[in-house]
Amino acid sequence: MTVRRRFTKVATAVTTSIARLILPFSSAIKTAMRCRLIPARWLLAAALFGASTAFAAAQDKGTVNPKPLPPLANPNDPELAARELFARRYLPAALPARPIGFYAKGCLAGGAALPITGDTWQVMRLSRNRYWAFPSMVALVERLSKKARSEAGWPGILVGDMSQPRGGPMLTGHASHQVGLDADIWLTPMPDRQLSRNEREEMSAVMMVRRDRLDIEPASWTPTHWKVIRAAAQEPAVERIFVNAAIKKALCREAKGDRSWLAKVRPMYGHDYHFHIRIKCPPGSIGCEAQPEPPASEGCAPADLAYWFSDAVLHPKPPKEPPKPRRQLTLAELPAECRAVLAAPDLKID
């Protein structure tokens, strides 16, 4: 296979993946891609626009005095964005724990909370109320925090967004994180003290990618970082870990010993100050839509990373016309079970 064909194949696969995860709800885009009606560069521009807004929002500061959202004038409006409904559910549904649907198109029944402070972890941006997940994901984050201390020497980890109490689409920040099987972990080690509430809302994570986007920032990146990512990837339930391509490049260069875990670490837009853990659908979870497993190779060959360091990706040309706002999912477009999740009484929290 020539380099040009290899590049085209990788670019097509990435564009398809982005269209599903960031613009997953447009049948017109999927049809156009299948029939080659829209040039790939146009789809890439739209994907980059959606990605940039999502990843920028993920680093936004919070507030120590969050106010409840105002009541909806017509919550039964069939055209109402589902994110408006899920954002107004402040506690989990009193139902058995279950991820429903796909990572970017679903909801969460019986969500469990990660305690906001542990010996080896602290939750950031508490005002977002996104420290909920499927119970096995909560347990995994707690385990990882202990491994970050024992294997990398960190005091612990800082935990970013997981899911909303009932999952579902979010008002800001993410296309995925909807079924309780995703979690963001900051690449900034937890300080050896308990952060104040204000610090958890105002503190920024450290940028790990060099200004030219071609490699990691050596003043920020240390050998301990790849050890923490490795600890996460070696968890059997983990299916993928998303990082910036510059971070993937550093992992490929620095990882020692058994390198099989590198196959799970996938380059993705953004993700330059945190890494994103995604676990598999739990065994027996009916209605959870699985994602195909990533290729078994390390993904470290020059051809595997060429797309991500191409000029088109590093310096994308602005579209001739501003991209239209992404159409938001309605409740009718989510799995039918999500209606019951929204309607269920609140889970009583001890």
Image (cartoon, rainbow, N blue to C red):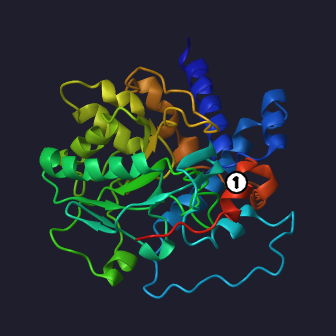
Residue 62, how many percent across, how many down?
Answer: 46, 78
Residue 80, how many percent across, how many down?
Answer: 81, 67
**Mark 1: which secondary structure?**
helix
Rendering quarter of residue 158: bottom left
Identify the residue at image location x=27%, y=48%. Answer: 144
Q: Circle 1 sits on which residue?
A: 338
Q: Farthest top residue?
A: 1
Identify the residue at image location x=77%, y=57%. Answer: 331
* Nearer-the-camera pick, 41 or 197: 197
Label 1 CA crowd tier, 10 Å (few <14, some 14–19, many 20+): many
**Which quadrant, please, contains the C terminus?**
bottom left
Residue 84, how many percent across, how many down?
Answer: 70, 70
Name which residue type carries label 1: Cys
The answer to whether any part of residue 271 appears in the image is: no
Residue 216, how many percent across, how many down?
Answer: 31, 48
Q: Is residue 33 above or below residue 222?
A: above
**Which quadrant, please, contains the N terminus?**
top right
* Nearer-the-camera pick, 307 or 119: 119
Looking at the rendered structure, the number of numbered marks drawn on it comes to 1
Q: Is residue 256 above or below residue 134?
A: above
Identify the residue at image location x=72%, y=83%. Answer: 71
Rendering quarter of residue 92: bottom right
The answer to whether any part of residue 68 appears in the image is: yes
Q: Is residue 16 left or right of residue 299?
A: right
Q: Is residue 192 left or right of residue 317?
A: left
* Nearer-the-camera pick, 305 or 346: 346
